[in-house]
Amino acid sequence: MIVNSAMSIINAYLRLVERWRWSLLLTLLIATFLLQPLWSHTRLGELANVTLYLLVFGGAVHAGRIGATSAVGVIALLSMALALQVLSTLGIAGLDGPLLGLMLVIVVSALIATFAELVGSREMTTDSLAGAIFGYFMIATAWALLYLRLEAWQAGSFRIPNGGDLDMQLLYFSLVTITTVGYGDITPATPTAQVLSVLEAAIGTLYIAILIGRIVGQFKFGEKRVEPECERSAMSFTGQRSPEEDKGAS
């Protein structure tokens, strides 16, 4: 009964993803960012937060361009990550490391599916632009997980103010790094952390310049081109036809 209800909810969610695609996923991801500091202090809050992230990542794989075999593998990883988070919520220790590693693999898979869809799409729409922004925030999420993994492996990799949730603090650091804001309240303290931070800032800058620039450049505004008066006069004088007149003649 519970399994059937869960599958019905998942199928309904996937239908929404098919309809609204990147606009829905971008809204969900931003909502998850905003809700994370409010409920990450409890076990149930962590479970809700991870569940939301998994829904976003799974939706990205569903909306993106990925093979059937890869999709099955991602579904298996999503199920394993959710199971580990449920066990962690029940009080079983020692699962944070494997869960973090799984989440990192999942978010990278979602990124690949997202980029493959955006780059392979010929027609650019408002939804494509939403997908590009979604991918930008997904890069920040992937780097936040990478920072968490680094901090768990080598404690003290970042100078972090005392208190607060480590997951939220490193997500915040990742967001201010990729946007090159750099407030300075959290800083990388080891060479590895410094290199990763610089790479994230560089990738964020190149992403905006290349991918988002490409999408905006090919964006379909749905507006008819209006020729300046001087251009129409020149065409009339030389006997040339405008593109609109050529279409009418054909």
Image (cartoon, rainbow, N blue to C red):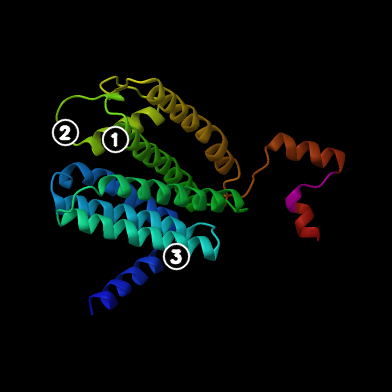
What amino acid does circle 1 point to?
A: Ala
Within-10-Å neighbours for mark 2: few <14, some 14–19, many 20+: few
Q: CA distance from mark 2 to mark 1?
A: 16 Å
Q: Quadrant of residue 190?
A: top left
Q: Who comes first in sequence, dot 3 or dot 1?
A: 3
Tell me, yes or no, whether the highlighted magenta stretch contains residue 241: yes
**Going by the image, does 203 lie left or right of 189?**
right
Q: Can you identify the residue that label 2 sits on? A: 164
Circles 2 and 1: CB atoms closer than 8 Å: no
Q: Which mark is residue 152?
A: 1
Is residue 72 located in the magenta-colored stretch of the structure? no
Residue density around tag 3, few if under 14, some if 14–19, many if 20 or more, within 10 Å: some
Which structural element holds mark 1? helix
Residue 90: x, y in percent? 15, 57
**Residue picked out by circle 3:** 18
Q: Secondary structure at mark 2?
A: loop
Q: Amino acid at mark 3?
A: Glu
Q: Which residues are magenta?
A: 240-244
Residue at horizontal 34 percent and vertical 71 percent from the top: 12
In what quadrant of the picture does the C terminus appear? bottom right
- Three-letter amino acid code of the residue under disc 2: Gly
Q: Position of residue 198 (x, y in %)?
A: 44, 24
Between the residue at mark 3 and the residue at mark 1, the CA separation in whole angstroms equals 37 Å
Q: Which mark is residue 167?
A: none
